[in-house]
Image (tube, rainbow, N blue to C red):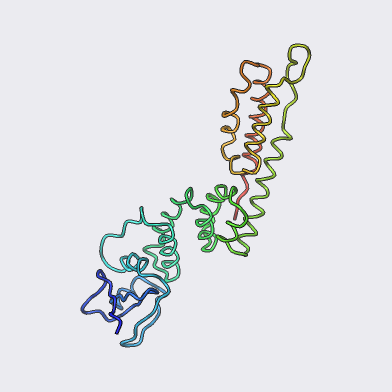
Amino acid sequence: MTELRVSDRFNALDSDVTIRSSDGVVFRLHRKNLHLHSDAFPSQEEGEIVDLTESSDVLEIFFQYFYRQPQPDLTNIRMHTLLALSEAVEKYRVFSAIEVCKAHMRARMSSDPLAVLAYAAKHGYVDICNDVAPLTIGASTMDAINALGSSTTFAAWALYRDRRVEATTRIHDLLPSTIVKHKGGWDDCEKWWQFQAEISRYLLGHPERLLDIDEAFSRYEDLLEECDHCQKRAANWRGKSALEVRSSFRGRFA
């Protein structure tokens, strides 16, 4: 006979509710706590074990919100655990934990932008969607499908990304004409063409780099060396490009 695995933290002797995780760990809890802190917890017949779809590592954190004790520290938990916990508190309407999970999901925007976007879109958190969306435009279509699914969220993301990718092309259309002729009457010198080519190569296929357009110009400005004519032209192009980027990213995702 398989030995029953029971949570060390949640093994109350006076328990009147028994929960089993998806990986077979039992949690002995109190019905009044579940009803007090959740609006959507499944009902239970006397003596019945309630099976949940969440894993034990998620439920170990989840059930801490049902008791009078310090809340768990979510700072260093793995992303997939945080995401599963965030989904659980939404599913069972544990209001004391929803805002906490929202804050921690927002804090993971830089490291896991697609996962955060999928979560925020699913639960209607428009502010998080709009904040994290710019960080996702460098993702591949396959990664976006895997994270967002074949849904209206993916369609919205694809349209959002396309508008930002188009900005890369428009930046090249903003190339200013020569302000002052070079010595000998030339519009351009070889330094300019190398500079322009490197900017184009840096941005090509990387729309996320538009988020720091100044970096694109700064990393190659030394190529212009002491050519004042090209430096003035580059400054003009840089300013116009920054305005274009601000305009392109002003639109909201949701």
Q: Is residue 230 above or below residue 52?
A: above
Closer to the camera in the image, 40 or 14? 14
Residue 155 position, x and y percent, is 65, 59
Closer to the camera in the image, 199 or 59? 199
Residue 192 position, x and y percent, is 69, 23
In which quarter of the view is residue 49 placed?
Answer: bottom left
In the image, taking residue 113 as reference, residue 189 lies left or right, namely right
- Most extreme residue toward the right is 185
In which quarter of the view is residue 74 placed?
Answer: bottom left
- Most extreme residue toward the front is 1
Q: Is residue 51 above or below residue 248?
A: below
In the image, taking residue 17 as reference, residue 112 lies left or right, namely right
- Count numbered badges in the picture: 0
Residue 208 position, x and y percent, is 59, 43
Residue at figure coordinates x 53%, y 50% from the top left: 132
Residue at figure coordinates x 66%, y 27% from the top left: 195
Residue at figure coordinates x 67%, y 45% from the top left: 165
- Most extreme residue toward the left is 13
Residue at figure coordinates x 61%, y 57% from the top left: 142
Quarter occupied by the C terminus: bottom right
- Most extreme residue toward the bottom is 46
Q: Is residue 224 above or below residue 88?
A: above
In the image, taking residue 37 as reference, residue 199 lies left or right, namely right
Quarter occupied by the N terminus: bottom left
Residue 186 position, x and y percent, is 77, 17
